């Protein structure tokens, strides 16, 4: 009779009695697609298994970090060794230095690295540093780029080419959000206009160089260089938020792929091998303003936690052990994207497909997608039909039209073939909906 979600439905109902909305991060609630989220019991390789006994080929990968696949032997062995030596010290360890060294080898722009516990903590800390270093107050972000849930960046842009920040959540003071300016992604002219007006007071521009939080949206050719040139000409700092795309689009992230050197970089996801972690770093002269080297305060009891450091070291060393790793990851992701596109065309659907490195995404729209406004032309009802049909056929995708998908080293050719076969059923249902709409 197909996949059943009886136990998950009961677990979700119980969770709502103790946890707001039944989840500890909003997108997990399936509000964007409807229905009941499966409660996961375990994971291995490319697969997830829920409490109802359903099995899925997973393309969420814990939202990116599981680039090697779930429960990779090297990562689990490192964790088993680490946990026997204690789970937290609140004191320096050799592991912190080793992971920082590996990060700097991959991201040479990160001359000094500070470990934190999440991507949100990394972006929050780096903005404080940027304001202190430049002695300026304003921050520029891009509509549709997400940098965590701290007050400075929970803002929306409105309909103009550039808009001063308006709080996007209750509880965010207008005085805090007002220091953030939002401009459209992939629009260098809009950024130049903002700098012409506010440039002397802009501390930094923070950008996802490959946007992954409005669906996967790559930068236009030459766009990141334009952003680099504009910030440099005004003495503002350029911050790359590579929490999602770092180690995903290339081993050295988007800055290696596109040849752009930011002043500061934020990382997360992959560098903890699936454990809670984040990091920020950049030019030595800027980073030496961070306490205790300098006056900008930032601290964390669990920062550099030995479990996260051990998992991160094992992950990065495994990624570099195979010189063909990224070619294979990119090839598998491209094969999946082509297969999905072919099935969509078979059923007469005009979709937009994006793929970069081991990230991919599709939009249910016939319009080119290059920024947030164009992304929102997507038919979210069609995506919900597609999503649930894929789920019921054993394919676990992000439960939102506006999220990216992730390939792992554990995905096989058989996994990709099964995913493409399932997509034929999903696209057929969307096409049927279109005919009867």
Image (cartoon, grey):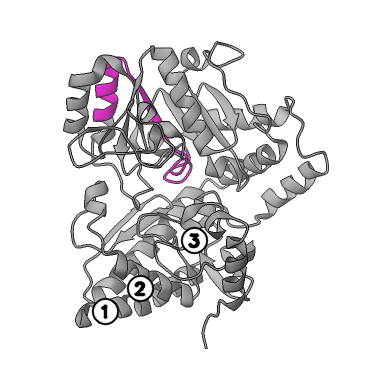
In front of the other: label 1 or label 3?
A: 3
Q: Position of residue 433 (x, y in %)?
A: 26, 79
Could you say which is closer to the camera, residue 256 or residue 282? 282
Q: Taking the image as drawn, is residue 107 in sight? A: no
Alpha carbon distance from label 1 to label 2: 9 Å
Which residue matches tag 3? Answer: 29
In the picture, the disc for residue 385 is 2
Q: Residue at x 75, y 35 (%)?
A: 88
Could you say which is closer to the camera, residue 25 or residue 83? 25
* Magenta-span inclusion, residue 246: yes
Q: Quadrant of residue 270?
A: top right
Dot 1, how many residues are within 10 Å of its Cα: few (below 14), some (14-19), or many (20+)? few
> Which tag, 1 or 2, sits closer to the chain's start?
2
> Which tag, 2 or 3, sits closer to the chain's start?
3
Q: Taking the image as drawn, is residue 216 in sight? A: yes
In front of the other: label 2 or label 3?
A: 3
Q: Position of residue 22 (x, y in %)?
A: 56, 59
Q: Residue at x 56, y 48 (%)?
A: 322
In the picture, the disc for residue 433 is 1
265 up-or-down from 404: above or below: above
- Quadrant assignment for the C terminus: bottom left
């Amino acid at each position: 009779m197909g996949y059943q979600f009886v136990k998950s439905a009961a677990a979700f109902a119980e969770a709502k009695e103790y946890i707001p909305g039944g989840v500890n991060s909003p997108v997990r609630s399936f509000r964007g697609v409807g229905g009941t989220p499966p409660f996961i019991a375990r994971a291995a390789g490319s697969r997830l298994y829920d409490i109802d006994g359903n099995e899925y080929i997973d393309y969420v990968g814990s939202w990116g970090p599981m680039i090697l696949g779930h429960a990779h032997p090297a990562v689990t062995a490192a964790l088993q060794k680490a946990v026997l030596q204690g789970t937290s010290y609140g004191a320096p360890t050799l592991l912190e230095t080793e992971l920082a060294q590996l990060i700097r080898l991959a991201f040479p722009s990160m001359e000094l690295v500070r470990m934190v516990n999440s991507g949100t903590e990394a972006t929050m800390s780096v903005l404080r540093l940027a304001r202190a270093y430049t002695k300026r107050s304003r921050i520029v972000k891009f509509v549709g780029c997400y940098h965590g849930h701290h007050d400075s960046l929970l803002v929306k842009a409105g309909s103009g080419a550039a808009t001063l920040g308006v709080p996007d959540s209750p509880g965010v003071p207008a005085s805090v959000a007002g220091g953030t300016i939002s401009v459209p992604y992939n629009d260098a002219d809009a950024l130049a206009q903002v700098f012409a007006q506010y440039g002397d007071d802009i501390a930094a521009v923070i950008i996802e160089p490959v946007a992954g939080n409005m669906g996967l949206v790559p930068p236009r050719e030459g766009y990141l260089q334009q952003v680099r040139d504009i910030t440099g000409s005004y003495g503002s700092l350029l911050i790359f938020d590579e929490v999602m795309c770092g180690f995903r689009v290339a081993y050295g992230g988007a800055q290696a792929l596109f040849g752009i050197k930011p002043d500061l970089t934020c990382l997360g996801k992959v560098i903890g091998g699936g454990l809670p972690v984040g990091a920020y770093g950049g030019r030595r002269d800027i980073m030496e303003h961070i306490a205790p080297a300098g006056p900008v305060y930032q601290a964390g009891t669990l920062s550099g936690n030995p479990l996260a450091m051990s998992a991160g070291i094992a992950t990065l060393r495994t990624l570099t052990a195979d010189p063909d790793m990224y070619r294979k990851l990119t090839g598998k992701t491209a094969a999946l994207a082509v297969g999905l596109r072919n099935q969509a065309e078979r059923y007469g659907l005009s979709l937009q497909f994006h793929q970069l490195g081991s990230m991919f995404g599709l939009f249910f729209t016939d319009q080119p997608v290059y920024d947030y406004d164009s992304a929102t032309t997507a038919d979210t009802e069609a995506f919900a039909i597609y999503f649930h049909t894929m789920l019921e056929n054993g394919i676990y995708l992000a439960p939102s039209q506006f999220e990216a998908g992730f390939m792992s080293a554990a995905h096989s050719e058989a996994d990709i073939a099964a995913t493409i076969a399932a997509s034929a059923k999903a696209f057929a249902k969307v096409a049927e909906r279109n005919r009867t709409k």
